[in-house]
Amino acid sequence: MRIVSISAELHVFDARVNYEEPLRFAVNFDDGSLIRLARMGDGEGVIIDRLPLEEPMNFEECGRTATFDVTERLDETLRNSEIHELLAIRSPSSKLIGLALARDGGERFCIWMDGGDEFHWGPESVLANWTWAPGGDGKIGSSIQV
């Protein structure tokens, strides 16, 4: 599978796009498939499925949501990367907290939650050196099927 793009559902308020706190991600592949990452209700875990991102919503005076291509903002080398395996990132209690994209010829790219209801991302080296919230720690584990 080759990455075509990574999209994010973002909050827009007063014409400012909040790129720092994505609501959901979708990794879009060249075969037309996608993988969505969404927050669990507890703000600590991740739901990984094949559903599309939510439709944009208008919250009137509180802003709106919209979908943006964030591929280059996440990592300039992601677009057109060949992904040969999807790996689970799990907490010490085995809760699914993220996804690692194993790509040919490059460091695995990770998207994860560290409590606090916010996504974080970067190459595996960033995950390995992450300062986790108390009680947290994410490790790349086994392959997952979505």
Image (cartoon, rainbow, N blue to C red):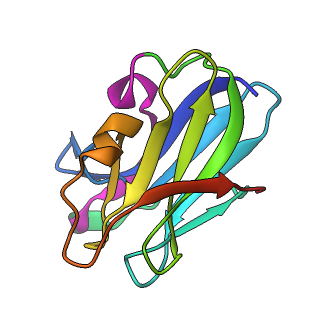
- Quadrant containing the C terminus is bottom right
- Could you say which quadrant of the image residue 138 lies in? bottom left
- Quadrant containing the N terminus is top right
Residue at image coords 27%, 59%:
63
- Residue 83, how many percent across, how many down? 68, 29
In the picture, measured across the screen, residue 1 lies left or right of residue 137, that is right
Residue at image coords 28%, 54%:
21
- Residue 22, how many percent across, how many down? 36, 52
The residue range painted magenta reads: 62-76
- Could you say which quadrant of the image residue 75 lies in? top left
Residue at image coords 33%, 36%:
125
Q: Is residue 53 visible?
A: no
Identity of the residue furthest to the right in this view: 31
Identity of the residue furthest to the bottom in this view: 42
Compared with 127, 95 (above or below) is below
Q: Which of 24 and 139 is in front in this view?
A: 139
Compared with 81, 14 (above or below) is below
Asked if the magenta segment contains residue 91, the reply would be: no
Q: Can residue 104 be seen in this view?
A: yes
Compared with 52, 48 (above or below) is below
- Residue 134, how many percent across, how many down? 19, 76
